[in-house]
Image (cartoon, rainbow, N blue to C red):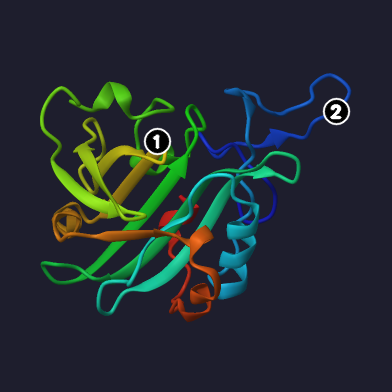
């Protein structure tokens, strides 16, 4: 993922559009929006993704006390724009230790959120009990947004998903007990609306979570 585009669903190599296909192709998943190489977190890297994004670039804002921005990724190319975005943040966990959070916004079927969640499906729908009350709510761009637990994920993380602005919103938290963060009235801002405030985002070291 560091040097060339990859499949957002499996991380495998992808072939660029050519004579026989006008989309990026994964040998396993067929046509995909390519996941672009991840670079170290910086305000400049964040602004590049914000400019190219066709979907929200969600970040807790203000960040929880002691938390830092630790990575950003997007799936798409110059022609399509970013059709999925992932923003990583890290900081003190609610029960001690270090907590890590990746927020993903994506169109139906892109599969980036599912990859970080560790489930074998492009979308969270089959793994959510939306016929039952939401497990938690947060504010996304000023709107109350219900999220449900996503089942079938690895034991080392807590995964929530819902819809915001008509698109999937995933919240993946490590370790699993840091999922308590999602019950703390988290407020998300779409950084496409933040303007010059993005220059104030505190940056930390790149998290390996966003490379996995």
Badge 1: residue crowd in 10 Å (few <14, some 14–19, many ≥20): many
Residue tagged by mark 2?
18
Left or right: where 37 falls relative to 175:
right
Q: Which residue ends up furthest to the front in the rendered image?
A: 142
- Is residue 128 placed above or below 65 in the rendered structure? above
Left or right: where 136 falls relative to 157:
left
Q: Position of residue 27 (x, y in %)?
A: 64, 24
Badge 2: residue crowd in 10 Å (few <14, some 14–19, many ≥20): few
Provide the secondary structure element on which disc 1 rests: helix
For the residue pair 82 and 173, the one nearer the viewer reads as 82
Q: Position of residue 197 (x, y in %)?
A: 49, 75
Q: Decide which of tag 1 and tag 2 comes sooner along the chain.
A: 2
Left or right: where 93 falls relative to 71:
left
In percent of the image, x 43 and y 64: which residue is there? 207
- Is residue 205 placed above or below 150 in the rendered structure? below
Q: Position of residue 156 (x, y in %)?
A: 23, 48
Left or right: where 126 falls relative to 4:
left
Q: CA distance from mark 1 to mark 2?
A: 28 Å
Residue tagged by mark 1?
114
């Amino acid at each position: 993922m560091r040097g060339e585009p990859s499949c957002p669903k499996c991380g495998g190599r992808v072939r660029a559009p050519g004579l026989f296909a006008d989309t990026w192709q994964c040998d396993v998943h067929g046509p995909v929006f390519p996941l672009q190489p991840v670079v170290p977190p910086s305000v400049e890297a964040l602004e590049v993704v914000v400019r190219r994004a066709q979907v929200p670039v969600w970040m807790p804002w203000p960040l929880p006390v002691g938390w830092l921005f630790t990575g950003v990724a997007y799936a798409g190319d110059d022609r399509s724009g970013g059709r999925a975005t992932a923003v990583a943040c890290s900081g003190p966990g609610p029960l001690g230790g270090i907590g890590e959070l990746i927020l993903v916004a994506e169109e139906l079927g892109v599969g980036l959120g599912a990859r970080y969640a560790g489930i074998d499906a492009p979308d969270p729908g089959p793994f959510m009990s939306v016929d039952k009350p939401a497990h938690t709510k947060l504010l996304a761009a000023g709107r109350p947004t219900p999220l449900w637990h996503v089942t079938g994920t690895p034991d080392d993380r807590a995964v929530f998903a819902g819809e915001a602005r008509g698109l999937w919103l995933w919240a993946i938290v490590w370790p699993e007990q840091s999922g308590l963060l999602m019950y703390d009235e988290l407020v998300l801002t779409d950084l496409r609306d933040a303007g010059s405030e993005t220059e104030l985002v505190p940056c930390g070291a790149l998290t390996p979570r966003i490379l996995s």
